[in-house]
Amino acid sequence: MSDPYNPFEKELCLTRHALELTDAYEFGIAIATKSPLITRDIDILCSIREHSPVLCKITVTAAEDKLAAKLEPGAAVSSERFQALAKLRDNGIFAGILLMPVLPYIEDNEDNIRTIIEQASQCGCNFIYPAFGVTLRQNQRDYYYEKLNRIFPGENLVGKYRKQFGESYECRSPKAAKLYAMLSEECGKRGILYRMKDIIHAYKKNYGDNQLNFLDRI
């Protein structure tokens, strides 16, 4: 399991070749990534869009580059991801943000979420799909807690997690309901989709009808 635009992709072009096959056999595509390298393949994505639905999802959970670099040192900072989203949208690609996982006590504050929504709007994003929390299996939890202590020394984040979540797999932000209400209101003002059923309907719009019309003519 890997980001389709991992560091090796720039040289190996395995994802690009997979997209070429997807296009050749006239399938649609849905991509989730944290990398602006996706913009390299806009030509193929536009070609696929001519016959089938295309959905591009870029993960953004920290509005500020400084925080993003702390949490994901091997990935592009958020400003680069927003630039990629803007380029996708400029080329007519249906694209938006995966706002997940939003880490409790780190990213689950109104200023962070509101700023992401504002920047998404400036980029012309079609959607923001949120999940306010994180999931932790046992080995993940141990690793995650070790990193919290290293990256945020003296903030007792591990103590907060243990008190709030114990050994739970799902660590839902205590602010989740409030943040979701704010997000739904702000996205509604800006015409940004945030419900999965609406996102699916929008990116597939017209393609199903065209296929049915084609079958009717046979």
Image (cartoon, grey):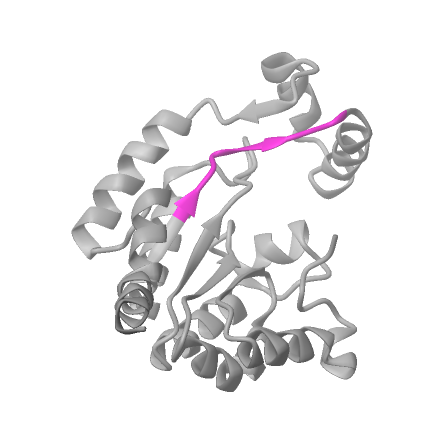
Residue 3: percent from the left, percent from the top?
68, 60
In this picture, is 208 found above or below 12? above
Residue 132: percent from the left, percent from the top?
47, 34
In this picture, is 98 found above or below 120? above
Residue plotted at (77% across, 39% down): 147
Along the viewing direction, whichever of 201 and 165 lies nearer the viewer: 201
In this picture, is 101 found above or below 25? above
Along the viewing direction, whichever of 203 and 168 lies nearer the viewer: 203
Residue plotted at (28% across, 37% down): 182
Residue 134 among those drawn in magenta? yes
Residue plotted at (34% across, 77% down): 92
Q: Is residue 133 left or right of residue 166?
A: left
Q: Please count the marks in the image.
A: 0
- Residue 195 visible in the picture: no
Q: Quadrant of residue 41?
A: bottom right
Residue 21: percent from the left, percent from the top?
63, 77
User: Which quadrant does the C terminus fall into?
Assistant: bottom left
Q: Is residue 146 left or right of residue 115?
A: right
Residue plotted at (73% across, 57% down): 2
Q: Residue furthest bottom?
A: 43
Magenta segment: 129-137
Q: Residue furthest front?
A: 218
Residue 191: percent from the left, percent from the top?
21, 56
Along the viewing direction, whichever of 149 and 190 lies nearer the viewer: 190
- Residue 30 visible in the picture: yes
